[in-house]
Image (cartoon, coloured by chain):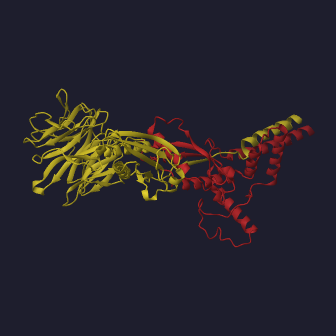
Chain colours: A red, B yellow
Amino acid sequence: MRPGIFVSIIGHVGAALMTLLAWETVSVPQGGGTIVVPIEIVDVAPEVNVRALAREVEEEAEAPEIADETQPEEATATPTPRPRQPQRPNDDDWMRDLRADLSDASKERGQQQRDGERADRDQAGAGLGTAERVTLEARAAALVQAHLRRCWRMPADLPEPERLVVVVQFDVNRNGTLNGQPRVTTPRNYTFDAPMRVAAEAALRAVRQCDPFPFPDDPVVGEHYEIWRTNEYRFGLRQQN
Amino acid sequence: MQMIKRFLLAVFAFAALAGLNPAYAQLRVDITEGHLNPTPVAVVDFNSQNAAAQQVGRDIAGVIRANLDRSGLFRPVDPNAFIERITALEVPPRFADWRVIDAQALVVGEVTPLPDGRIRVVFRFYDVFAEQELPGQEYATTPDNWRRVAHQISDRIYEQLTGERGYFDTRIVFVSESGPRTQRVKRLMIMDQDGANPVFLTQPGALVLTPRFSPTTQMITYMSFENGPPRVFLYNLATNRREVLGDFPGMTFAPRFSPDGQRVVFTLDMNGNSEIFSMDLRTRSRQRLTNQAAIDTSPSYSPDGGQIVFNSDRGGSPQLYVMNADGSGQRRISFGEGRYSTPVWSPRGDLIAFTRQSGGRFAIGVMRPDGSGERILTESYLDEAPTWSPNGRVIMFFREGRGTGARLWSVDLTGRNLRQIPTPTDASDPAWSPLLP
């Protein structure tokens, strides 16, 4: 009888934990596009965060800030108070314990192979949950989209412009300057494709011309170097029907 | 117990690596909006040790700047803004000085007189932001031929920056018009695409119309009233020889070369019924392509020579039709409001330019060969007779105002870069040459 109850309790607790884990895992955005981020999370997250941040600032800073109330509510361009470590609304004790356990588990299994830089990076992102991450990425994306608009000459007047999609990768330093040279990852070879060559050069030129990038000066994403350290931009005209 | 604990920890560790731990990822962004502003290019006056050659160097740079500016794709940076003074081609430029003035490309060059009286022109070309040298070129020519060198350098720059063939080293043949309206003198004239070096090709006596360039050779076909009834003529620019295309029973007009230059397609009017014929220029054998009671005219080949677009009023009003080069498979492609005429197939093959008359106004537009995607590029009291640049990006046409003479204009495919081409007289019916050999 007693062993049966013991097994049953472990089973139920395990199932509950798994459910929670599954929820968390599904919610994490994956860059490859294989997992679809639910729309609700994307929409709700900014509001949650902005309020949390605003409250925190009000509590912390006594100085009268003409922050949120007086400014129009713009999702991207409006400067908002500089966030400290954002408070996770869902971050209850239970999850913290779980994370501690997991950390221990990882250590036990000897799978932590971090060098100094990686550790720094992980710690910086350790406070980020799905909602924050999506928000920050969306904000960083909006920032850079606006920033590149003046630097990228679109290939709209080349033959078959919708075909000319170029993916460029590059790294950015903490101060927003280019780290190394941008490189075209897609298409792999465009030596003999003149319009594609021009499109690729235009994308590279855009990245070089838009150096430095505006991330560090942004009050929200500025501190989250891990979000905008490595960049992959897909330059292509919006598909028209 | 130990097993269960280990199992759970393993599951947690896996889940943590997969999801909970904030994965270090790239910021992936779709960039779909940019600008279409002209690219700033700095063209430095070409250097020389010799005073006379120095003037040529300045002139060459001036023509290059004007060409790039007229294309609408580039904006020459004002030389007064230049910081670095380029004195030697061997020394790489200080790219930072050119970035500051927002030049994305830099063109420098040198003119050197040669012992045989010719000049040597060298140009170098840099991508300022990538700090890379792009392929330059070296030319040797007679000093009075400096304009063509400037045009060829412009074409090289255009090709490097747009990925398409240039069109600056080309010429325009057109009908020069002068004299009072009742006694209009119409002569064939030819000039560089920028309006320089205009020369008359025919005498004032005979009325000429619809000159057309061969796409492959420096040959022109046109219609003239030289010997009475209108006939189609061939004019070889290399030899200055003219000949009548053929002796036909009726009036021949609207001639145009096939893409290989070996055939001419034209309209033959017999007792008020116009039909389209093609003629092999070597064998002089002709082939009838249309057979309708309606007026069929203004034929123009597709660049692969497989199809012909033409104008017919068989549906009640002039509309555009496409047929195979042997006359089969005729089908209507224009269905918009108004009357469509003077169709011309783009050298790129993707578009057909036309004149559309509706509501008392004339417009120049383009549509795909299947009739879809119709776009009007310009419209005025009278815009007519489009002709394509050899790279299929620019259209030249003539515009006539109410009570004012006709003048040549060009517009690019965006419809935004509309410019007048300088001509010494009133001008109509332009035809763009292929790139000069």
Would residue A160 appear left or right of B7 to someone viewing this image? left
Taking depth in this image into account, of B372 and B185 the one nearest to the observer is: B185
Q: How many marks?
A: 0
Would residue B71 appear left or right of A75 to someone viewing this image? left
Residue B209 picture location, percent across and down: 17, 45
Please state, as top left, top right, bottom left or bottom right, where the C terminus of chain B lies in the image: top left
Which residue is located at x 21 percent, y 50 percent? Answer: B428
Would residue B166 appear left or right of A77 to someone viewing this image? left
Which residue is located at x 76 percent, y 50 percent? Answer: A123
State which quadrant residue B8 falls in.
Answer: top right
State which quadrant residue B202 falls in.
Answer: top left
Which residue is located at x 59 percent, y 52 percent? Answer: A141
Residue B294 picture location, percent across and down: 17, 41
The answer to whether one can see residue B413 in this image is no
Most distant residue in the right direction: A2
State which quadrant residue B220 falls in.
Answer: top left
Taking depth in this image into account, of B404 and A28 the one nearest to the observer is: B404
Residue A123 to residue B248: above or below: below
Residue B339 picture location, percent across and down: 24, 49
Residue B258 picture location, percent across and down: 25, 34
The answer to whether one can see residue A222 in this image is yes
Please state, as top left, top right, bottom left or bottom right, where the N terminus of chain B lies in the image: top right
Most distant residue in the top direction: B283
